[in-house]
Image (spheres, rainbow, N blue to C red):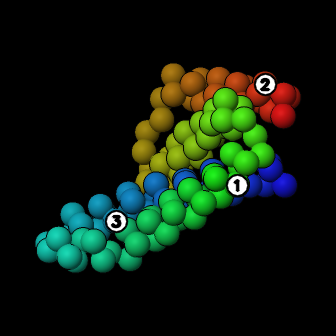
Amino acid sequence: MTAALLAAVCLLTCLGQVAQKLAVEGWRERSLSLTGKLLSPWLLLAIACLGAALLLWLLVLQRLPVGLAYPMLSLNFVLVTLVARLLFGEHVDTRHWLGIALIVGGVALLGLQA
């Protein structure tokens, strides 16, 4: 159950980050007032995803010590990098991929504790 909650937090946070990116991309395409920007569907989705992730995070913290749970959120670096590469066509260099591998290795080591 705790692993599923952590995965949901990571996925919702990643989706929230992607929605933020899509919101600002939409702002560039046309001139919007502040109200128009704040009511952007992508921004509203980002707020909803990040809000839901926060609530689930509180459930995670009831089950795991923060020193173990918080480093697990570094998987967001992995997810956001993959989405940035696949969805937005952003360049990811070798050093970045090596960093991602280290993050995955670190999370795997911490996962052995849980």
Q: How many marks?
A: 3
Determine which residue is flagged by label 2. Answer: 109
Query: Is 14 left, or right, of 56 in this rendering?
Result: left
Query: Is 49 left, or right, of 66 in this rendering?
Result: left
- Residue 36, by quadrant, is bottom left
- Disc on the earlier residue, 2 or 3: 3
Determine which residue is flagged by label 1. Answer: 59
Front position among marks 2 and 3 = 2
Q: Are marks 1 and 3 in contact (CB under 8 Å)?
A: no
Q: Looking at the picture, which amino acid does disc 3 mark?
A: Ala
Q: CA distance from mark 1 to mark 2?
A: 22 Å
Q: Looking at the picture, which amino acid does disc 2 mark?
A: Leu
* Residue at image coords 80%, 50%: 2
Q: Are marks 1 and 2 in contact (CB under 8 Å)?
A: no
Q: Is residue 113 visible?
A: yes
Q: 10 Å neighbourhood of mark 3: few (<14), some, or many (≥20)?
A: many
Determine which residue is flagged by label 3. Answer: 23
Q: Are marks 2 and 3 in contact (CB under 8 Å)?
A: no
Q: Position of residue 113 (x, y in %)?
A: 84, 28
* Residue at image coords 46%, 71%: 45
Q: CA distance from mark 1 to mark 3?
A: 29 Å
Nearer the observer, 31 or 34? 34
Q: Position of residue 14 (x, y in %)?
A: 55, 53
Q: 10 Å neighbourhood of mark 1: few (<14), some, or many (≥20)?
A: some
- Residue 37, by quadrant, is bottom left
Task: Give the secondary structure at mark 3.
Answer: helix
Q: Looking at the picture, which amino acid does disc 1 mark?
A: Leu
- Disc on the earlier residue, 1 or 3: 3
Q: Which numbered dot is residue 83? A: none
Q: CA distance from mark 2 to mark 3?
A: 36 Å
Task: Give the secondary structure at mark 1.
Answer: helix
